[in-house]
Amino acid sequence: MQKASTVESNGQWATREFSGAVFPDKRLVKRLIKIASHFAQTPTGSLPRASGSWKDAKGAYRFFDNEGVSVHAILQPHQEQTARRAAAHRTVLVVQDTTGLNFQGHPATEGLGLVGTGRDGALGMWLHSSLAFTPDGAALGVVAVDWWVRDPKDFGKAAQRRRRPIEEKESYRWLKSYHATVKWGHENPGTRFVNISDREGDLYDLFALGAQHPEAGILVRARHQRKDQSGASLTEMMAREQPAGTLEIEVPRQPGRPPGGAKLSVKYTALTLRAPQSRSAEKLVCLWIVEAQEILAAGSPHKPLFWRLVTNVPVTDFESAVERIQWYGKRWSIEEFHRILKSGCCVEDRQLETVKRLSKIIMVDVLVAWRVLELTRAARRAERMKAGEYFGGDELAVLKQLQLKKGKVMTTEATMREVVRLVAQLGGFLARKGDGDPGPMTLWRGLECLSQLTLGYQLAKLCG
């Protein structure tokens, strides 16, 4: 069945994010806007189901098969919009992380590589995402996306990694994300950009690169026992430091641990980092260490949180140490983003003939997943953002009628928080007093339900 029209807010969002795309044919820009709008309207659907008609599905297949369409060309207009949003903030956190996409169920796709640990492991591809956040958690957009496949013929090469230059290793992805952050720092001198990564990003090459670019910060969770110029290890250095104070934080749900508050003891100190022995001629790198150790009551059933953070952004007092910890706390956001991408967009169910085509459709899914993440974050922020900035008039009309049916009233000045909670209830959120804010997956399901209800509303208007 042909869709009556694209839901207004999805069309507005897609137009804003993609109208600046540069393709050999301007008609491809219109096609991208339509595809993105359809994907946002039916996020869990296959390409034919999301498209709503064979004509639009055929147009989408042709778009992803077009040699004039590249992953970069799809991402580029969104990057420009993200940079515009970032320029309005004094500090922007660029969080990077890697996830594996398993396409074992679609072995006919040409060009897939290993995503498991063995030579005969699952087939798929690797995705490395870098997202921009404000310090209070607003998701501004995607800074960079990198993807690659592991050729089964290269299995075992990790044993020779020390003899290969960093540019030939998969770990170079962490430096590529930082290069992108530096570029944004150059172009937006009024904004401080800080690149954040987990323990895999603990690379001497990254710290050495950061020493050359003071316009972009680095914050990494330490993995290695690095040494300062005196030969002392990080553990030995921090053992000499006295706690500077304590900090209360909220911890999301983790394996073996329910969500809730945690009390951390905070230490910090400066570090003059010594280069590895194989590169002893290189200059010393000036960094700072911030250590946060959870204080647990006797008999606590879970392991204490322990973060040892390395940064090139100066830490001169307790307040700046706390700020670095709070920055690192935003790293969980990219894990939430990858969950949305896999479970919400069902990206691992995509079926195209080649990895090259698959990477293009994944890029659209990446940007739709960012939109859902930002809707979730917008609902949690304190300011009274009007719902009309994110939702279309028909969508708000449907929600208003649903509330009237329950004997309740939704005002025309409803805030994002109020409307998102209503949408999430369509996805199974109970909205009880102690339930807190809805998560992205209930919101995801609610958006899809709202999309179908709005389609019925539009058809009813057309039929009179």
Image (cartoon, rainbow, N blue to C red):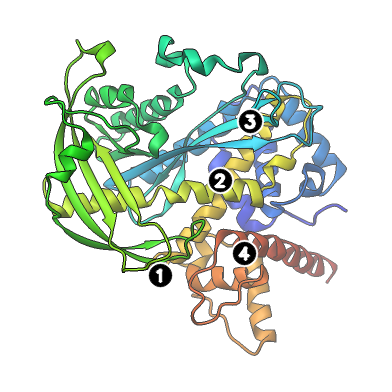
The first of marks 1 and 2 along the sequence is 2
Dot placed on the residue nearer the N-terminal end, 4 or 1: 1
Q: Where is mark 4, residue-wise?
A: 442
At 63% across and 77% down in the image, what residue appears?
400
Apparent side of residue 342 relative to residue 413 in the rendered image (left or right)? right
Q: Residue furthest front?
A: 299
**Residue drawn where x is 66% and y is 48% of the image:** 345
**Viewer-nearest residue: 355 or 292:** 292
Q: What residue is shown with label 3?
A: 115
Secondary element under disc 1, as helix, strand or loop, is loop
Compared across the picture, whether 75 is left or right of 332 comes to right
Label 3, secondary structure: give it. Answer: loop
Classify mark 4: residues with Cα within 10 Å, few (<14), some (14-19) or many (20+). many
Few, some or many residues within 10 Å of mark 3 (<14, 14–19, 20+): many
- The reply to whether discs 2 and 3 touch (Cβ–Cβ < 8 Å) is no
* Residue designated by label 1: 384
Classed neighbour count for the residue bearing mark 2: other residues with Cα under 10 Å, few (<14), some (14–19), many (≥20): many
Q: CA distance from mark 1 to mark 2?
A: 28 Å
Task: Look at label 4 and name its amino acid.
Answer: Thr
- Amino acid type at mark 3: Val
Q: Earlier in the sequence, mark 4 or mark 2?
A: 2
Q: Is residue 14 visible?
A: no
